[in-house]
Image: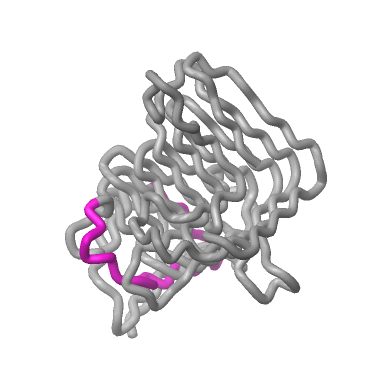
């Protein structure tokens, strides 16, 4: 699903369906849902006055055959994190992708990538995002290089399962709601910009990195030592409805600028 905005923009794609299902097999993968410009003489690769807009009213599933393989396979020639394959990519200024239902994505790359100024990906409900682990390259469940990613940002009672790290540069923002007992984040919040996380009602955050950074990846400029850094962490009203942070033997430091409410922390 690819929208290629003009210089002035304003183009839109709307998919009105209970479920949109995507599988990409073979080759070098790609992007499942993308706002991205092709090369045109005299046009900046990201510039668009009004940008583009993709709206998916229902669920978005990017899965492999029988759910046993990657929904989008790896690109062995491209390991710079900003240019990884992505389940959802917004690469044009002033653009947006909105998913009204749940997402379920297995991507050998990034789950969601935003690189456009004043651009947004909004996952209104929850869902599951899984990316590779145990590699020496940066693969992220959510990656905001420029622009904003919202996932269950109003902290509604939607289940969110993130199997992968979160990455935010100084120009990016992520707003994430983990708000029920089935929700979790397994990964770090490598944040050099704004990262707001709600953790309550029994949700669990295991603060342990999934991958090492690629040594030549100059696009990765979050925190300097891959510690987790949360701009605002919102917990439960009391410890009875708090969420839990797990610091394992492999966890790096966790920095919180602002804390609201109650949060439990368990150390290995």
In x, y percent, where is residue 53? 59, 28
Front one among 261 and 206? 206
Q: Residue at x 30, y 52 (%)?
A: 191
Q: Residue at x 49, y 32 (%)?
A: 38
Q: Residue at x 64, y 58 (%)?
A: 24
**SS assignment for the magenta stretch, majority:** loop
In x, y percent, where is residue 107? 55, 62
Q: Residue at x 43, y 66 (%)?
A: 76
Q: Is residue 12 above or below residue 153?
A: above
Front one among 146 and 223? 146
In x, y percent, where is residue 122? 56, 40
* 195 in the magenta segment: no
- Residue 206's quadrant in the figure? bottom left
Q: Is residue 180 visible?
A: no
* 211 in the magenta segment: yes
Left or right for 190, reference 114: left
- Residue 55's quadrant in the figure? top right
- Numbered range of the magenta stretch: 196-218
Q: Residue furthest right?
A: 18
């Amino acid at each position: 699903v690819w929208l290629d905005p003009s210089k002035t923009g304003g183009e839109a794609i709307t998919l009105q369906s209970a479920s949109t299902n995507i599988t990409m097999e073979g080759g070098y993968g790609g992007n499942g849902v993308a706002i991205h410009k092709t090369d045109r003489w005299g046009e900046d690769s990201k510039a668009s006055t009004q940008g583009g807009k993709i709206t998916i009213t229902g669920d978005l599933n990017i899965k492999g055959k029988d759910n046993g393989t990657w929904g989008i396979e790896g690109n062995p020639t491209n390991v710079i994190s900003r240019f990884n394959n992505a389940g959802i990519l917004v690469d044009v200024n002033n653009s947006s992708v909105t998913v009204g239902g749940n997402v379920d994505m297995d991507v050998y790359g990034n789950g969601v990538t935003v690189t456009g100024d004043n651009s947004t990906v909004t996952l209104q409900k929850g869902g599951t995002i899984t990316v590779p682990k145990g590699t020496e390259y940066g693969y992220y469940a959510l990656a905001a290089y420029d622009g904003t990613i919202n996932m269950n940002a109003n902290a509604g009672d939607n289940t969110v399962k993130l199997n992968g790290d979160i990455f935010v540069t100084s120009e990016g923002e992520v707003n994430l709601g983990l708000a029920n007992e089935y929700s979790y984040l397994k990964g770090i919040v490598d944040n050099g910009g704004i990262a707001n996380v709600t953790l309550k009602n029994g949700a669990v955050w295991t603060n342990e990195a999934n991958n090492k950074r690629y040594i030549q990846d100059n696009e990765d400029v979050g925190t300097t030592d891959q510690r987790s850094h949360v701009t605002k962490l919102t917990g439960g009203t009391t410890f009875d409805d708090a969420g839990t942070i797990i610091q394992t033997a492999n966890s790096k430091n966790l920095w919180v600028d602002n804390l609201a409410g109650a949060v439990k922390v368990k150390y290995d």
